[in-house]
Amino acid sequence: MKVIPMAEVEIKNDAKTVKVPDNSLLVDLDGKCTIMFACKSGSCGSCKCKVVSGMENLEKPDDVEASGLATFGTDPADRLPCVAKIKKGKVVLEY
Ligand code: FES
């Protein structure tokens, strides 16, 4: 039996942790947490969250996310979960 490595995403606002496969887009949290997803393409800013810890476990923002953060981000810890990918380990988000 093959074991799929799972990353953990803690949503402080929900006081819960969601497991997703390593290398998942955080949009995979849609329906499993109260983060509001709208465009799911990094262009509306509605999903913007602050990374409380575990930024090192996220892929660096690609051009799409960097463009969205340039428009909607207000803090270096901000990320757009609809286009951000978790590599492995744990990340703690709040919105
Ligand atoms: S859902 Fe629109 S930027 Fe993430």
Image (cartoon, rainbow, N blue to C red):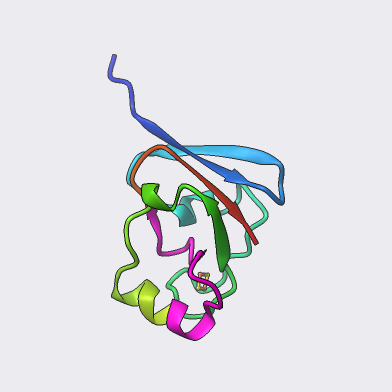
Residue at image x 57%, y 63%? 49
Side of 3 relative to 78 (left or right): left
Magenta residues?
Answer: 69-85
Tell me where residue 2 appears, x and y as whole percent: 28, 19
Is residue 13 positioned above or below 82 on the image?
above
Tell me where residue 10 appears, x and y as whole percent: 58, 43
Residue 49 or residue 82, whichever sits in front: 49
Residue 4 or residue 53, whichever sits in front: 53
In the rendered image, the quadrant that contains the C terminus is bottom right
Side of 37 relative to 28 (left or right): right
Tell me where residue 34 appears, x and y as whole percent: 67, 55
Is residue 76 in the magenta section? yes
The image quarter in which residue 35 lies:
bottom right
Residue at image x 71%, y 47%? 14
In the rendered image, the quadrant that contains the N terminus is top left
Residue 71 or residue 47, whichever sits in front: 71
Is residue 89 positioned above or below 3 on the image?
below
The image quarter in which residue 83 lies:
bottom left
Is residue 34 in the magenta section? no
Q: Residue furthest bottom?
A: 71
Tell me where residue 16 appears, x and y as whole percent: 66, 39
Residue at image x 56%, y 39%? 18
The image quarter in which residue 3 lies:
top left
Side of 1 relative to 26 (left or right): left
